[in-house]
Image (cartoon, coloured by chain):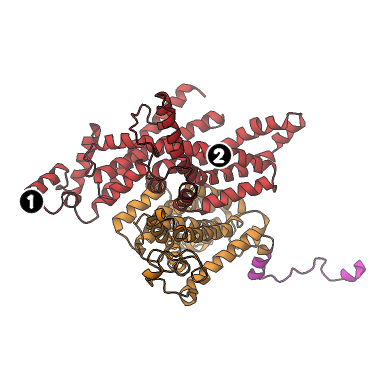
Chain colours: A red, B orange
Amino acid sequence: MGSTRLLLYAARRLLFIVPVMLVALFLVFALTRIVPGNPIDRVAGPYISTERRAELKHLAYLDRPFYEQFALYLRDLSHGDMGTSYTTAQDVSKDLRQRFPATFELVTYAMLFAVLAAIPLGIAAAIKKDSWIDSVARAVSVLGVSMPIFWLGLMLLYVFFYYLDWLPGPVGRTGSATVFVKPITGFFTVDSLLTGNFDLFGQVVKALALPCFTLGFVAMAPIARMTRAVMVEVLQSDYIRTARSLGLPFRVVVLRHALKNAMIPILTIIAAVYGYALGGEVLVEIIFSWPGMGQYSYNALLSSDFPAIQGFVLLVTFLYLVIYLCLDIANAALDPRVQY
Amino acid sequence: MAIEEIVAPGSSIAAPPPVVGRFSDFVYQLRGNPATFAGLFIVALIFLSALLGPVLARYDPYGVNLGDAAVPPSFAHPFGTDQYGEDVLTRVVVAARLDLIMVLSAVVLSTVIGVTIGALAGFFGHFFDEGVMRSQDVLQAFPRFVFAMAVAWALGPGVITVIVATAAINIPGYARLMRGLMLSVKESQFALAAVAVGNSRWRLLWRHLLPNCLTPVIVLSTLQCGFTILEAAGLSFIGLGVRVPTAEWGVMISMGLQDFLQGHWWIYTFPGLAIAVAVLGFNCRTSSIPSGGGYRQCPCSRFRISARVSFSAVASCVSWTA
């Protein structure tokens, strides 16, 4: 496995991203343009002069046929211009840059929690099949798959915010602290520590706790289930028996021999869940008033904000494809048999 | 009893196999599997309340009664009432019908379209296969819920919207599963034999190949029922699906959200529980189908794909779904 070959493979895969994103963008264009009504009419309101209305439509290319709009959007995009949002009156690229860190921070901590809880749980359940810990693992995976995520968020809010009043309510990223955090990394947990503001750090962690747990609990279910299933299978294989009979400690056998071989399907499901969460945890963001991309896309949809919808879809499709690219590279690094 | 008596001359050593119908197979399988039994029980309960809900209900699900608004659970109103004084228990029970109709229609719609696309792609291959599969790749590059939101928004709120939107996001999964199955089944011995005796291509596809691919599809669609309940409720919850004041589980939770700061927990707790129990029922019903020995006795055992193949195929689809 030469590193140049790996690089070439990554480059080839990155090139493949471009046509997929073009088609995805075309789909979004088609979907938004078949809806009757012109968004400018809605944004401009009823009291605007006809000339000004026509001018606004012209500026947004909305007076042109569908294919011309698409071509013009691609032209602007090649200059790095994603258009201006109708609702925030900012560049869409700026909007997304401001909102992406909120989603990224939430999803990253949620996935961290999910992975750190689900993998040990899955391993323990696989080692002690049909014990109480197996039952716990099964209950977690069944519950996580069955509960509506927005309902779980509401119930947690009721208990921990309304009833016990331990954690802040759904008021965004800094909880009850009404300060403006100047973004350095965009992760408020990191930024508040970098600036030495420990009070703010506490608030940020408290504000993160509920949305993270909500998202993390739902993300745990498939990971725990997959870990258990794969580990049960791997632990029955011949080379594990050989390793045990050679006198290796159980711990080493499980962690170094079994887990490493079980890692590929586990990583696959983690990537799937991560991509799903990063792109669309709209419902969690709505429940917790989280100022991230999910809520942005939801508002953009409701107000027919075409450039914002297109920008969001571009970014999310890109992230999705990059996550799968990373997954393939990780698989290649883990499994020497993988050819690319 | 001596052995000679049993193995009488001329009689067969093996006892004749007991006459087993599909139904008794089914009962036999259930006996060894409490999870499936529980799942079946829940699903039956939902179907029952969908059928009889409006008859059993003590109150009118749309009976606005502001004098009794937001009453906590009591003897008269076991699940309390919402902010318009409508009985929550009645609405939860009555909503089963609408939710079940939406979910089943969406699952049937996506199964039929996805299976058709996948079967044609796998059967004809080449250019057609490439085209279909690449377009499915593009659809899968969207996060599922965002895609459903976009479709629902484009169509405008309504029951049909929920059905179409939740069906649309599930089509790629079926197409992928069916294509893979078709690719393996069309190379099998019985397919060759069917061609050799002179079946036409369409007859081969319809009568010989398709039935042999159906078991995994059935497993996936049962699983999809659960996911679809969640997605339909999610769409209605954010106002892109069915709208207030319809008695629908997702809508009822969103009505509860409006009263969140008044602490009226019962308005959203019980519809959410109904969703969770329903999804649990559909998932339990499925989780045991592809596992191990009981599988061959399942009512659809005449379809001859081995349990392993179907399980791994479904698992690959589900891993994407999750």
Question: Quick one: A325 or A270, which is closer to the camera?
Answer: A270
Question: Quick one: B163 or A236, which is closer to the camera?
Answer: B163
Label 2 secondary element: helix
Q: Is residue A18 magenta?
A: no
**Which residue in the protein does label 1 denote?**
A50
The answer to whether A277 appears left or right of A121 in the picture is: left
What amino acid type is highlighted by mark number 1? Thr
Is A213 rendered above or below residue B4?
above
Report if residue B11 is visible in the image.
yes
Chain letter belonging to callout 1:
A
Bounds of the magenta segment:
B1-28
* Figure quadrant of residue B256: bottom left
* Figure quadrant of residue B216: bottom right
Label 1 secondary element: helix
The answer to whether A166 appears left or right of A172 in the picture is: right
For residue A266, which numbered disc appears in the image?
A: 2
For residue B93, which numbered disc appears in the image?
A: none
Q: Position of residue A86 (x, y in %)?
A: 21, 44
Q: Position of residue A206 (x, y in %)?
A: 46, 38
What amino acid type is highlighted by mark number 2? Ile
Question: Quick one: A21 or A116, which is closer to the camera?
Answer: A116
